[in-house]
Image (tube, rainbow, N blue to C red):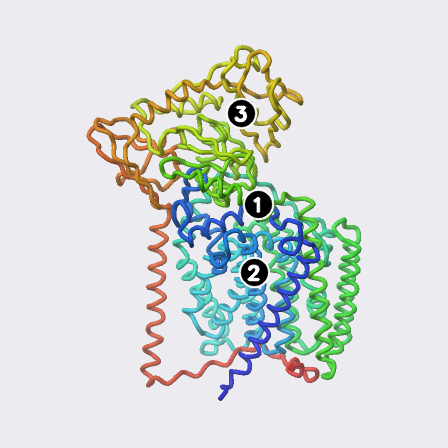
């Protein structure tokens, strides 16, 4: 027997399912049209998707299957050992991320793609649930609008290759839903948990979604007449805002064990790139309303012409009360303008201009547009005058975009055709007999425009951004070679250069030095640069350093060579001891810095400029050189520098054979360069000395390192890992020796134990425990009140519905099928 609420709930489920289906079909159709993975030969792993996010999901796969070196707190595979919890919180805390574990590891690219599609579909379903919670209306129309939100230009062009941003796409309707609960005085515990889930999944976009949800709640309150407290509407509204704010604060506090380490890690990361915000030209802004447009530096405003027509018609829609028309139209315009004003731009982005795409808050505008469209539709179908007025507004916007290079002929054709079809379909819906064909036309317009936008976006990204191949034979061969050479923790195995991605150790295996993240530690980047390493992404993507001296220092005993073979060498162990002495500091020469860190002289100066003694190995350092260099009798090597984005790595040039091996630059001689000549015999002697004095029986786990010292050991114990914040040795904060974790010991010390705990984890956990207790205390009196009434359930307050949401003609309820 059905309850009075079962039919609306069932219709909401139908609408959510329809939205998810439309979204999935459109996304897959657009990808197939562009012939990108998994539907064709073109690479899908564009920019950070292939370079960063796929490798991190591969590492999550390894963690889930017990194959990773390290754990949730400490990652031994990247950057010679770095904190993992901040990366986990930034890229992998979405509930969808764990789905990678059900795929074979070689299908990691497919797993990330499936997760991306599922997230987009989930955002569509969540929006439907929000719309039907706010106002009653036809479930299929809610499904159409939900799909329009999930298929907005921001989602299918920008977030599609930043999959963690899609958690923000899901978060916005969920956070608006917590506002509806606050409006009705319902589900305070569930609201806090939803906030916690959203902020844990991706704090960055959740922050933007929270701001947007707050704006929506303010507009909802401005229209409500039934939110009263003892006849005082203002007090009632304040109480609603208080309930919403309390749920938000408690939810963010519950997420603190992830958020606190993440925020602290961001402050300790290498600064990367920053720039001043400059608003995009008005013509370019309007052009992004059209389908089939692409630009990396303007907001992707497309949300489907059928939805845009409803919003543009809202000011002319007389069935909607004037107060509602004013508030919703004003909110849409205010948020649109906020994208273009520097102070509000900074507010949307947590007061820091983002690296790369500057309009990451655009999905909030798309959500508000859809909510405003539903507010008008729920009051009744727009009439001919309203539709004509809305079409006129959109035509003017399209005309304003005519001078933009972003606008395309296909975009105008799809926009004009879609506007005509959508206008006829919305008008035809006023007759019940035409509901199904008209709804079908609206779905076709949305799917067609979205698929075209997706395909065009792929072409734009592939034409202007780096792309990385999906897992294939080259990946498998490298991974197999690394696995066969592994000897951790006795020695590290490095994935080598040239790299397939910036995070090859996570993707392929080993325990190398390459690392690319928003949390790349400042101390790690500066240490590796001092030793001669190269970078991309302005210092956030540190490359592996192919050099025997640094390999010896960082315990790299095996290295993958470009020809697929494994090069082996005897390296110092993971933990070594350096003699007592004054603090040391790096200088300008990477070769002198390497010797300082090694503790021995192993390089010779050239006999003449550009000429090494026969039998020594030549190494070139030219960090700003973009071109080829070679020994005159040897092969050419490419150095890739595009300051400040790319820095060229120290390059091995081969064994010198005398005067015939003079250094030759194929281009203009760089302003800054240095050639050094390595004597392998000296290096072997230095490594043997470090091994002779090193602690015995080192034990490495997911939280740190333990080692037994040799009798009489004194000086400084050095762990070949960057001295990031969070290391403690024997219960005291660890120090640093030339950028590596260090700890002084006296002759009586017999063992040393160094453990790592991300800064902020303990206070973040304490905050979460307090929040959980506060939430529990808030909920317990509610349960006692119910028991005091004999266990009878309280009557639910009637949902607050803005006045004037019923039209005497063509009501939305007449369209239910």
Q: Distance between the residues labelled 1 and 2?
A: 35 Å
Relative horizontal placement of residue 572, taking residue 396 as reference (left or right): left
Where residue 629 is drawn, which disc sits there? none
Category of crowding for the residue at label 2, using alpha-carbon neighbours closer than 10 angstroms: few (below 14), some (14–19), many (at least 20): many
Q: Tell me, yes or no, if residue 327 can be seen here.
A: no
List x then y, in percent, for residue 236: 47, 73
Instruction: Compare residues 335 and 310 and report the one nearer the observer.
Output: 310
Q: Residue at x 45, y 74 (%)?
A: 185
Where residue 169 is drawn, which disc sits there? 2
Q: Is mark 1 on a helix, strand or loop?
A: helix
Quadrant in which the C terminus appears = bottom right
Q: Name the residue beneath numbered marker 3.
A: 652
Instruction: Compare residues 121 and 707 and report the one nearer the observer.
Output: 707
Where residue 473 is drawn, which disc sits there? 1
Relative horizontal placement of residue 683, taking residue 809 as reference (left or right): left
Instruction: Compare residues 637 and 257 and report the one nearer the observer.
Output: 637
Relative horizontal placement of residue 334, taking residue 542 as reference (left or right): right
Q: How far apart are marks 2 and 3 (CA)?
A: 47 Å
């Amino acid at each position: 027997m059905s309850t009075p609420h079962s039919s609306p709930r069932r219709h909401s489920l139908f609408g959510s399912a329809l939205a998810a289906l439309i979204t999935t079909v459109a996304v897959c159709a657009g990808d197939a049209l562009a012939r990108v993975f998994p539907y064709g030969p073109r690479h899908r792993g564009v920019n950070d998707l292939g370079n960063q996010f796929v490798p991190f999901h591969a590492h999550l796969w390894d963690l889930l299957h017990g194959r990773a070196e390290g754990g949730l707190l400490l990652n031994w595979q990247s950057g010679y050992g770095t904190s993992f919890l901040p990366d986990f919180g930034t890229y992998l805390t979405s509930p969808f991320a764990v789905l990678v574990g059900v795929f074979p590891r070689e299908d990691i690219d497919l797993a990330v793609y499936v997760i991306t599609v599922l997230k987009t579909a989930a955002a569509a379903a969540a929006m439907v649930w929000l719309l039907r919670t706010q106002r009653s209306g036809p479930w299929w129309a809610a499904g159409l609008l939900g799909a329009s939100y999930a298929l907005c230009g921001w989602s299918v062009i920008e977030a599609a290759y930043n999959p963690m941003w899609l958690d923000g796409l899901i978060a916005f309707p969920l956070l608006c839903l917590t506002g509806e609960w606050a409006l009705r005085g319902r589900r305070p515990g569930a609201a806090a948990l939803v906030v916690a889930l959203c902020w844990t999944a991706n704090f960055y976009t959740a922050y933007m979604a929270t701001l947007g949800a707050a704006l929506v709640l303010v507009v909802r309150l401005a229209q409500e007449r039934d939110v009263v407290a003892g006849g005082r509407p203002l007090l009632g509204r304040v109480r609603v805002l208080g309930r919403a704010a309390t749920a938000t604060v408690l939810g963010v506090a519950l997420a603190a064990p992830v958020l606190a380490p993440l925020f602290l890690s961001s402050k300790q990361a290498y600064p990367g790139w920053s720039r001043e915000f400059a608003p995009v030209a008005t013509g370019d802004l309007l052009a992004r309303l059209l389908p089939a447009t692409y630009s990396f530096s303007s907001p992707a405003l497309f949300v489907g012409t059928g939805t845009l027509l409803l919003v543009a018609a809202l000011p002319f829609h007389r069935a909607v009360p004037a107060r509602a028309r004013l508030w919703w139209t004003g909110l849409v315009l205010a948020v649109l303008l906020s994208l273009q004003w520097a102070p509000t731009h900074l507010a949307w982005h947590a007061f820091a201009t983002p690296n790369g795409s500057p309009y990451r808050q655009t999905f909030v505008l798309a959500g508000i547009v859809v909510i405003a469209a539903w507010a008008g539709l729920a009051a009744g179908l727009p009439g001919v005058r309203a539709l004509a007025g809305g079409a006129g507004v959109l035509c003017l916007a399209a005309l304003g975009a005519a001078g933009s290079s972003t606008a395309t002929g296909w975009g105008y054709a799809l926009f004009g055709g879609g506007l005509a079809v959508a206008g006829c379909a919305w008008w035809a819906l006023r007759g019940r007999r035409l509901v199904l064909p008209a709804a079908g036309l609206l779905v076709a317009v949305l799917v067609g425009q979205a698929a075209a936008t997706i395909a065009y976006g792929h072409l734009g990204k592939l034409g202007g951004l780096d792309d990385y191949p999906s897992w294939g034979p080259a990946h498998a061969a490298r991974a197999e070679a690394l696995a066969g050479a592994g000897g951790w923790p006795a020695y590290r195995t490095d994935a080598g250069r040239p790299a397939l991605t910036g995070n090859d150790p996570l993707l392929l295996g080993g325990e190398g030095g390459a690392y690319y993240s928003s949390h790349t530690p400042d101390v790690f980047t500066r240490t590796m640069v001092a030793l001669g390493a190269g970078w991309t992404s302005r210092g956030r993507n540190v490359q592996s350093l192919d050099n025997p001296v640094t390999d010896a220092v960082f315990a790299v005993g095996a290295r993958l060579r470009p020809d697929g073979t494994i090069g082996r060498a005897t390296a110092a162990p993971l933990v070594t001891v350096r003699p007592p002495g004054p603090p040391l500091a790096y200088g300008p020469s990477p070769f002198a810095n390497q010797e300082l860190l090694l503790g021995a002289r192993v390089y010779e100066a050239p006999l003449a400029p550009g000429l090494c003694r026969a039998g020594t190995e030549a190494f070139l350092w030219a960090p700003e050189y973009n071109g080829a260099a070679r020994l005159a009798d040897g092969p050419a090597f490419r150095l890739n520098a595009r300051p400040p984005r790319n820095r060229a790595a120290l390059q091995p040039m081969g064994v010198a054979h005398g005067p015939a091996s003079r250094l030759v630059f194929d281009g203009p001689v760089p302003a800054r360069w240095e050639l050094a000549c390595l004597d392998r015999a000296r290096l072997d002697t230095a490594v043997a000395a470090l091994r002779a004095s090193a602690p015995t029986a080192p034990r490495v786990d997911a939280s740190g390192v333990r080692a037994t010292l040799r009798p009489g050991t004194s000086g400084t114990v050095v762990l070949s890992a960057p001295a990031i914040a969070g290391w403690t040795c024997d219960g005291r904060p660890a120090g640093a020796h030339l950028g590596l974790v260090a700890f002084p010991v006296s002759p009586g010390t017999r063992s040393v134990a160094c453990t790592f705990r991300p800064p902020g984890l303990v206070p973040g956990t304490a905050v979460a425990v307090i929040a959980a207790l506060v939430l529990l205390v808030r909920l317990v009196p509610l349960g006692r009140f119910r028991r005091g009434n004999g266990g009878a359930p309280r009557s639910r307050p009637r949902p607050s519905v803005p006045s004037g949401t019923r039209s005497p003609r063509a009501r939305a309820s007449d369209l239910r099928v």
